[in-house]
DNA sequence: TCGCTATCGAGACTCTGTCTCGATAGACTG
DNA sequence: CAGTCTATCGAGACAGAGTCTCGATAGCGA
């Protein structure tokens, strides 16, 4: 898999220095980060980068389909650099970790009659391996 | 299926006039409404009801398990009076409608090794029957 | 090089949701 | 029924996430 920067470039997006810094910050983590998590990391590369720039860049990335966004009630939107590969998410109730789950079945067949589904996001809730092992 | 008010009562929640008004407003719609959608409807019953009261009541409802909440990126949290029955959601990209989908398979078996899943929320994206029929 | 256009940065602004705190209302006991 | 205890209420200040505006700047094609 190419880096996020390369994939964004290939999708025709104008890649400015700021967007490159944001994409590198996003790609450099295996986690699912929020926009405000990304700002200090992007500023480590370009100190004068603005908050609005991060939001605008992320919106542009999402529009290309190379970055995914997903929301949990009561939490800021998280961005996922791995959207090029379809996958689901498992959220640990105990520690809050968000784990990528390789997609198995295509779930769009679960759509109700008449509904034309092009994608399905599954979010599993439970306990991750580390938290399930604890007595608490 | 009993009404939401009855189910909340059965779950041991102290049902004040305000909570009853909010529960009736929530139950009286087949849609998936936001807290701020609910406020004017609750005020139609009890005019002096406050915004904080709506949020607090909804949080109490969710805690009983009789009301579900679900989030879409960039949108306020929506509340679902139908949480007593497990179901998924289909979101229309065109008109924004959120449609309940009766649950078919149990999806928790899709969890990765070591992850103990107790529930799975599937959100399908696509076009609802009305929008899919249109050329636009 | 010129000029068009997309992007940028700063910060004000909007919106959603939370918190505080004094007041009030339910529920329980005797 | 009165007293008391506690959960809930209402108002509004507050906090955090995200958007918008607008003048400035940087890419890019001609």
Image (cartoon, coloured by chain):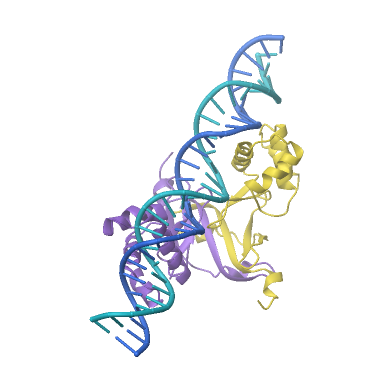
Chain colours: A yellow, B purple, C blue, D cyan
Q: Quadrant of residue A104?
A: bottom right
- Residue drawn at x 35%, y 65% is B19
Image-based side of A27 in relation to B38, left or right? right
Q: Quadrant of residue C30?
A: bottom left
Residue closest to the eye, B27 or A105: B27
- Residue drawn at x 43%, y 59% is B55
Q: Residue C5's spot in the image, x, y percent?
A: 58, 23
Q: Residue A127's spot in the image, x, y percent?
A: 64, 70
Q: Residue B73's spot in the image, x, y percent?
A: 54, 50
Residue closest to the eye, A39 or C25: C25
* Residue A9 in sight: no
Compared to A28, does B9 lie above or below?
A: below
Residue closest to the eye, A19 or B13: B13
What is the number of callouts on the image? 0
User: Can you say which quadrant of the picture contains the C terminus of chain A?
Assistant: bottom right
Residue closest to the eye, A119 or C3: C3
Compared to D25, does B132 lie above or below?
A: below
* Residue A97 in sight: yes
- Residue drawn at x 36%, y 69% is B4
Q: Residue C8's spot in the image, x, y percent?
A: 65, 31
């Amino acid at each position: 898999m190419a880096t996020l920067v390369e994939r964004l470039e290939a999708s025709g997006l104008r890649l400015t220095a700021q967007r490159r810094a944001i994409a590198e910050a996003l790609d450099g983590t295996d986690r699912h980060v929020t926009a405000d998590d990304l700002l200090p990391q992007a500023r480590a590369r370009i100190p004068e980068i603005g908050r609005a720039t991060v939001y605008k860049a992320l919106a542009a990335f999402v529009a290309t389909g190379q970055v995914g966004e997903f929301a949990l009630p009561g939490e800021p939107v998280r961005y996922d650099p791995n959207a090029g590969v379809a996958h689901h998410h498992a959220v640990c109730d105990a520690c809050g970790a968000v784990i990528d789950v390789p997609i198995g079945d295509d779930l769009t067949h679960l759509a109700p009659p008449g509904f034309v589904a092009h994608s399905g996001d599954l979010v599993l809730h439970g306990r991750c391996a580390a938290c399930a092992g604890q007595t608490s």
